[in-house]
Image (spheres, helix red, strand yellow):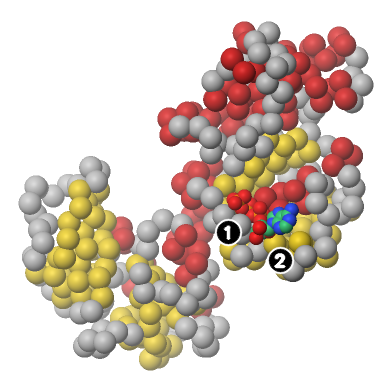
Amino acid sequence: MASIQIENVQKAFGKTIAVNHLNLDIKDGEFFTFLGPSGCGKTTTLRMIAGFYYPTKGVVRFGERDMTRVPPEKRNTGMVFQNYALFPHMTVFENVAFGLRVRKVSAADVKGKVLEVLRKVRLENYSNRQVSQLSGGQQQRVALARALVIEPEILLLDEPLSNLDAKLRDEMRAEILRLQRDYKITTIYVTHDQAEALSMSDRIAVFNYGVCHQVGTPAEIYNQPANDFVASFIGEINLLPVQVNRVEQENIAVTLKNDGEPVKLIVHNHANEGELNKGDLAVSIRPEAIRILDTAEDQTNVLKGKIEAVQFFGSIVNVLVQVGHVTLRVDVLNTHEFGYFYQGKDVYVELPEKQLRLIPVISGDAND
Ligand SMILES: Nc1ncnc2c1ncn2[C@@H]1O[C@H](COP(=O)(O)OP(=O)(O)OP(=O)(O)O)[C@@H](O)[C@H]1O
């Protein structure tokens, strides 16, 4: 068990800066996820923790220990790779035993430890099978058992579920969480799948182009995105470019930047938004936070619109509402009678003040 500190780490490959100005403080026993699109620096960061890469600048610590230049075999981390990297011609037992034999553990201890970990991953009846005769999910369990058998301080998982079909992925998510809670092991999980990150993690770090944009619990990342990249990478969101008219202690008055009639909104002044005085800004609101009304009550942030399209998804109905020159995505639970929402219907939409957040636009495209 160990905490992990990453202090001002940079990793360059020639001219490519794969990771830059990275600071992370991962707690002992935490399930911590690196989330971001392909090429954003997740795997490079994981490999610096495993010791397969050394940082160009900065420090990596496990607890109080400086690990920056310690080789992988001296780190006591267990790693699971996307392609499992198992030995296909060897049995399940031999695959799991490998790391113990390298560490010169006695034959009796090897047997005891391997059988115990195989029980934990529910493969005790498969120890003599060849790995090549197992299903994808079973191979994934062998890879987990092999990482766990050496009793690592830190478990590193690099997109471990990406080769599995959707149903198996769900099962293995639960399995990984069960093992992580069981072993109480500090775990870093790399994924580009936001649903996986939201449902599994204690905390998430969101990466793009080698930079970490936000660290927070799943609810913080979803409800309080730091900027338009985080907002749009996780879940669906409406992003409306705005200019600020007036800042007060409780709220901020803004006008949408669009070509039509000026549309004014009042946005709740969340504590960290005092510094929003330069650069491009947008207000963000999740589709499920917008309410569709039949009549306009005299309320703030109620806008007149027309339904542009309706898509049925089973439990939710996705309604696109055109307001002036802007299209808003609204998700409503499927509790209305059939045909209640239809294309061309005149409606009002309410954008509740507390659900609107004023955020910086860093990606230069907040119109979609
Ligand atoms: N060994 C290497 N040599 C040169 N460039 C590299 C090397 N490894 C990674 N990079 C570059 O560093 C950047 C970050 O790559 P990295 O593999 O960390 O991203 P990632 O977020 O894990 O992506 P993916 O999900 O596709 O694996 C990319 O631009 C990549 O091309």
Q: Is residue 116 visible?
A: no
At 37% from the left and 59% from the top, the residue drawn is: 236
Q: Is residue 193 above or below residue 320?
A: above
Residue 277, percent from left and from top: 51, 88
Quarter holding residue 208: bottom right
The image quadrant where one finds the N terminus is: top right
> Which of 288/158 is in front?
158
**Three-letter amino acid code of the residue under disc 1:** Val
| Up-down relation of residue 199 to residue 356 (above or below) | above
Ligand 1 position by quadrant: bottom right
Residue 108 lies in what quarter of the image?
Answer: top right
**Residue for badge 1:** 206
Q: Secondary structure at mark 2?
A: strand
Residue visible at 62% across and 38% down in the picture: 82
Which residue is outermost to the bottom? Answer: 245
Q: Which residue is mark 2?
A: 16
Depicted 291 relative to depicted 160: above or below: below
Q: What crowding class fits label 1: few (fewer than 14 Cα within 10 Å), some (14-19), or many (20 or more)?
A: many
Q: Is residue 154 visible?
A: yes
Picture quadrant where residue 295 is located: bottom left
Q: Name the residue at 33% across, 85% down.
A: 257
In terms of secondary structure, where does tag 1 sit?
strand
Q: Any atom of ligand 1 within 8 Å of the CB at mark 2?
A: yes
What is the x, y in percent for residue 209? 61, 65
The residue that appears at 77% across and 58% down in the rendered structure is: 6
